[in-house]
Amino acid sequence: MTEKETQQQIDEQLKALRKATNEAIKSKEAANRYLIEAGIITDTKESRFIQQNQSKR
């Protein structure tokens, strides 16, 4: 395989990875929006680090 073919294959894999990542982000955002609208979760986000430190006191 030539260097050009290798680079082309890498570029195609990166393109596919970016597409899959974008679709996963859309799915996560849609799921979060549904849970918030249903009142199952709230929109506020708390850091786990802060919660862990407070429970150790």
Image (tube, helix red, strand yellow):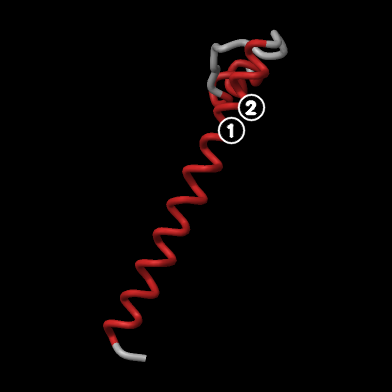
Q: Label 2's element?
A: helix
- Image position of 31 (left or right of 19): right
- In what element is the residue under mark 1? helix
Q: Percent from the top left, x then y, of residue 36?
A: 63, 13
Position in image of residue 28 (x %, y %): 58, 33
**At label 1, which amino acid type do we have?**
Lys
**Spot occupied by residue 39 in the image (x, y as percentages of width and height):** 69, 8
Q: Amino acid at mark 2?
A: Ala
- The answer to whether 25 is drawn above or below residue 45 in the figure is below
Q: Callout 1: few (<14), some (14-19), or many (20+) C-alpha neighbours within 10 Å?
A: few
Which image quarter holds the N terminus?
bottom left
Q: Which residue is mark 1?
A: 28
Out of 31 and 54, give the one closest to the viewer: 31
* Vertical arrangement, residue 57 with respect to residue 13, above or below: above
Query: How many residues crowd mark 2 within 10 Å: few (<14), some (14–19), many (20+)?
Result: few
Which residue is at 65% across, 19% downward? Answer: 34
Quarter containing the C terminus: top right
* Residue 37 placement: quadrant: top right
Residue closest to the eye, 11 or 41: 11
* Residue 3: percent from left, percent from top: 28, 85
Question: So how many labels did they put on this image?
Answer: 2
Furthest-bottom residue in this view: 1
The one of 21 and 57 positioned closer to us in this rendering: 21
What residue did someone put label 2 on?
31
Residue at the image point whose x is 70% and y is 11% from the top: 38
Residue at horizontal 53 percent and vertical 34 percent from the top: 26
* Contact check, label 2 and label 1, Cβ < 8 Å: yes
Q: From mark 2 to mark 1, how far is it between C-alphas?
A: 5 Å
In the image, farthest residue toward the left: 4
- Is 2 situated left or right of 12 in this image? left
Give the quarter of the image for residue 27: top right
